[in-house]
Amino acid sequence: EADIYQTPRYLVIGTGKKITLECSQTMGHDKMYWYQQDPGMELHLIHYSYGVNSTEKGDLSSESTVSRIRTEHFPLTLESARPSHTSQYLCASSELNYGYTFGSGTRLTVV
Amino acid sequence: KNEVEQSPQNLTAQEGEFITINCSYSVGISALHWLQQHPGGGIVSLFMLSSGKKKHGRLIATINIQEKHSSLHITASHPRDSAVYTCAVKYYGGSQGNLIFGKGTKLSVKP
């Protein structure tokens, strides 16, 4: 049973549209992350948060933005989607001394 | 050069075989994670290690901090073990909470 939920699982959208990928967790974890993964490649961190009202950019440059208004919710927004944004986006959370819990991911295709 | 190297990239085994997947890293780490992703599925965290060895069912993970090396073993492999197995390290320095991921090992277990 997943404790971290991502929606939608799959999304095909036209260029220029604004999209928000949702991520929610029920474990009360303070730390949450967004990773981007292209097919056959490793995951790269694009955003992370240590708690409410805390967000930071990761090591991989991304045109997306995130917000953390509630502990359990960490949505990722693309203001104007482009084909180069086509990828898989994975949300995760963690707590000190515990492993990471990953969501099932959102496969985004921008046409 | 990737700071986390996994081998092999692809592995095909017969049901019942003993499987080893290797992970080497070049940075100082505070923890190492083994992750599993079934085709079309989400990522599951199998182990978090900072020293020694952990066992869960037919899965065993070991780490040698001095040699900067970890192995994931699967005993009595089964077709349901077919998945991508990824090693990820939590390293000192860089964005706190960031993981560096290997490219994954695609395992296929034939009946």
Image: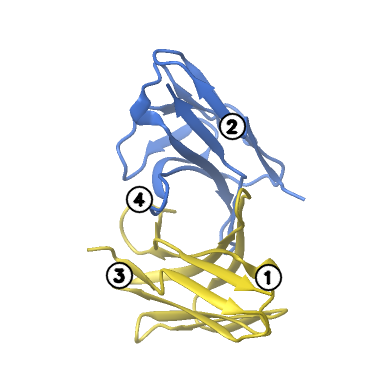
Q: Residues within 10 Å of mark 4 (few under 14, many from 20)?
A: some
- 2 or 1: mark nearer the eye: 1
Q: Amino acid at mark 3?
A: Val
Residue tagged by mark 3?
B27
Residue tagged by mark 4?
B95
- Point out the tag, 3 or 1, that comes first from the N-terminus: 3
- 3 or 1: mark nearer the eye: 1
- 4 or 1: mark nearer the eye: 1
- 3 or 2: mark nearer the eye: 2
Above or below A43: residue B14: below
The quadrant the C terminus of chain A occupies is: top left
Residue A55 appearing in the image = yes
- Point out the tag, 4 or 1, that comes first from the N-terminus: 1
Element assignment for label 2: strand
**Which residue lies at the image location 35% right of the left edge and 50% below the top edge?**
B95
- Point out the tag, 4 or 3, that comes first from the N-terminus: 3
**Which residue lies at the image location 39% right of the left edge and 13% below the top edge?**
A16
Letter of the blue chain? A
- Chain B as rendered: colour: yellow
**Which residue lies at the image location 68% right of the left edge and 70% below the top edge?**
B79
Element assignment for label 3: loop
Q: Amino acid at mark 4?
A: Ser
